[in-house]
Amino acid sequence: MTKTELLKRVFITTLPVLSGYIFLGTGFGVLLAKAGYGLPWAVFMSIVMYGGTTQYVGVGLIDSGASLVSAAVATIAICVRHIFYGISMLPLYKGAGLKKPYLMFSLTDETYALTVDNLVPKGVDPHLFRFLIAIFDHSYWIAGSALGAIIGTKLSFNSAGIDFSMTALFITVFVKQWLITKQHLPALTGLICSVICLCIFGPDRFLIPAMISITIILTMARKKIESETPSNDSKG
């Protein structure tokens, strides 16, 4: 596979994320611009933070003058889920060399979904393929954020409800995974555990208990899931 063919394959693979990140990033950029921070801040935050939900929440924290402690606690609460599914990526990232730090940094929910679901083309370095997916996804988010900051600065309109776009993307990713895979145990586990923990702990405290319970259940069911899931490192 030539470099051009590889890039084309990665672009096609990441098209679902492109369509989502451009709009989601635009929403973030608009909100940030409305809070008084323009294009440079939108691009900077998207490069060094690259956390969709965290950046949306960050706009509110900045706008309200929240303390660094409050910002840190909110960030940890939002991003703690990455610890749980990030652990499952360690075998895939083994031997990635210099690519590994960026692969770890850029592991968003959507990039994770693509990395897990898509088979690596035959003859292509798996680490390079995943690395390119991560770069493409990150660039989409930066582009969307920049576009939103420009729109938010130039146009005047009611931005209420834009922050719901992150919820919409999570629903889209869930539906996509359900439709393209025969193994629905992970999706059902995540859904059921989240609903139960939401009812028990409430909307402000359910995330960590839900992630812990999901991790325990999926760890126990790991052999069953792996036996029914095709390998990610070969094209079927």
Image (spheres, rainbow, N blue to C red):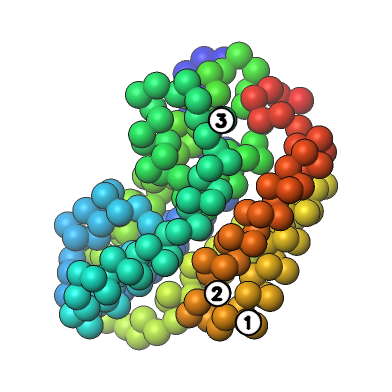
Q: Quadrant of the N terminus?
A: top right
Seen in the picture, residue 58 relative to 215 is either above or below; the reply is: below
Tag shown at residue 200: 1
Query: Where residue 117 sits in the image (x, y, percent)?
Result: 66, 41
Q: Secondary structure at mark 2?
A: loop
Query: Where residue 125 sits in the image (x, y, percent)?
Result: 53, 18
Label 1 amino acid?
Answer: Ile
Label 1 environment density (alpha carbons within 10 Å; few <14, some 14–19, many ≥20)? few
Q: Viewed as shown, does residue 36 lie left or right of 192?
A: left
Instruction: Please name whichever residue, 122 or 203, is drawn nearer the observer in this view of the structure.
Output: 203
Dots 3, 1 in contact, CB < 8 A: no
Which residue was labeled with disc 3?
92
| Residue 173 visible in the shown view | yes
Q: Residue at x 22, y 83 (%)?
A: 64
Q: Secondary structure at mark 1?
A: helix
| Residue 30 visible in the shown view | no
Which residue was labeled with disc 2?
206
Q: Residue at x 58, y 61 (%)?
A: 211
Q: Quadrant of residue 54?
A: bottom left
Q: Residue at x 22, y 78 (%)?
A: 66
Seen in the picture, residue 125 relative to 172 is either above or below; the reply is: above
Q: Quadrant of the C terminus?
A: top right
Dots 1, 2 in contact, CB < 8 A: yes
Q: Residue at x 49, y 70 (%)?
A: 165
Label 3 amino acid?
Answer: Leu
Mark in the foreground, 3 or 1: 1
Seen in the picture, residue 176 relative to 150 is either above or below; the reply is: above
Q: CA distance from mark 3 to mark 2?
A: 29 Å
Of the image marks 1 and 2, the number of the one nearer the N terminus = 1
Label 2 amino acid?
Answer: Phe
